[in-house]
Amino acid sequence: MNIVILSGGSGNDSLIKGLKEMYPESDIKVIINAYDSGKSTGICRKVTDTLGVSDIRKNHIRMYQALNQNPDKRIIEFYNNRYNFTKGNEIEEISKLLYNWNLNGLVKVVERFFNNSLARAFIYNDFNVSNIIYAQMFKDNGYEKTNKFFCDLLGLDDFVILNSFDNVYINAITESGNNILDEGDIVEYKNSNDKIKSIAYIGCKNRLNPKAIESINDADFIIISTGTFWSSIYPTLDYGCLFEYINQSAAKKVWAINNTEDKDSYGVTSNDFIDIIDTMGLNLEDFTILENLDSIDSLHEENSNYNIKYYSMGNDNGKHDPSKYANAIMCCYYDLDN
């Protein structure tokens, strides 16, 4: 089965784990955008003038963990740990970490990053080493070669697909007309009195990645999974009108609503989300909308206008139970009751 998931970095964590446990032979592709510009990713974008790396990195490590019962702790540290580095001594300190992780072949990548004069303007506190490596390799080799390099390192197939290679930054517009100019501020917004209503793209060329279109055309099953709505889900669907290719697809389609309120969509209900996506132009009549009975009450509201199914899928600090989530998704695919 060819499964395409549209989500962010951590939004499909439980889903990938559950699907791979249930259907280990399934061919899963994940379409994401790379517009993250917060924290360490934002600094890496400024230094290398590339797209954001974080959601690509997160999908790689989550698929690796889903497929390995005993993952290499060194790989986990490389991908997940964050460090404070001494200004002017970053290369030496990061190189020691890479040697400890048996990734000494990547030291020259770090050297190229910090030999860029732009890199010297920043303090590298609470910083993820893999973000630096990914960003510099994006600059040196392009997105697809970098993606393949790390998939080969982790023993994965080449499963992460960018919606577009356009080096875009996103802004948000609120109901009052206020502009939120940074993606990092969007995900931390938390204002139910002046909700975000749309996204604007800086550097927009509306060019889609042909592989994203191809994967949708080849899909048997398209899943819009959970994730940060205004930075991950909405821009991936909206940019270049990718949603139009989903509308044309004959695949089965499911959209899973989040468990909790993210800060970018504080006070937004499940029916509000449905209205936003419907207004975008995605044909929700083709979808089963999946809502979790264990979510907060406002995210599993009744709605008689669409095909909505309600399942108990767990809620551990916003995370679905992987097995219950995957089971509910596949019940929707096969039109089964839970």
Image (cartoon, rainbow, N blue to C red):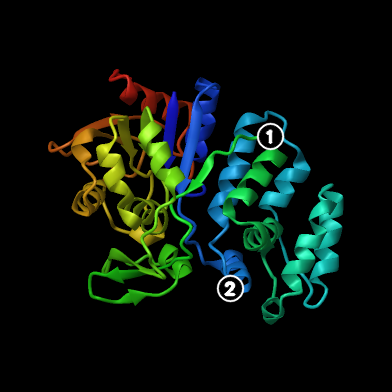
On screen, 219 above or below 86? Answer: above
Task: Name the amino acid, label 1.
Answer: Gly
Question: Hey, which residue is sitting farthest left in the picture?
Answer: 305
Q: Which residue is mark 2?
A: 46
- Secondary structure, mark 2, is helix
- Which disc is residue 155 wearing? 1
Side of 26 relative to 251 (left or right): right
Percent position (x, y) of residue 323?
Answer: 48, 26
Percent position (x, y) of residue 315?
Answer: 44, 38
Q: Quadrant of the N terminus?
A: top left
Mark 1 and mark 2: span between their CA atoms?
30 Å
Residue drawn at the location 69% of the way across and 70% of the way down: 125
Q: Quadrant of residue 159?
A: top right
On screen, 133 above or below 221? Answer: below
Q: Quadrant of residue 154?
A: top right
In this rendering, does residue 283 appear at all?
A: yes
Q: Quadrant of residue 171?
A: bottom left
**Relative depth, front residue between 81 and 148:** 148
User: Could you classify mark 1 by the number of other residues whose Cα lies within 10 Å: few (under 14), some (14-19), or many (20 or more)?
Assistant: few
Verify CB contact (< 8 Å) between mark 1 and mark 2: no
Percent position (x, y) of residue 116?
Answer: 71, 75
In primary-sequence order, the first of circles 1 and 2 is: 2
Residue drawn at the location 47% of the way across and 34% of the way down: 15
**Relative depth, front residue between 259 and 178:** 178
Residue drawn at the location 60% of the way across and 33% of the way down: 66
In this rendering, does residue 314 appear at all?
A: no
Number of numbered discs on residues: 2
Task: Name the amino acid, label 2.
Answer: Lys
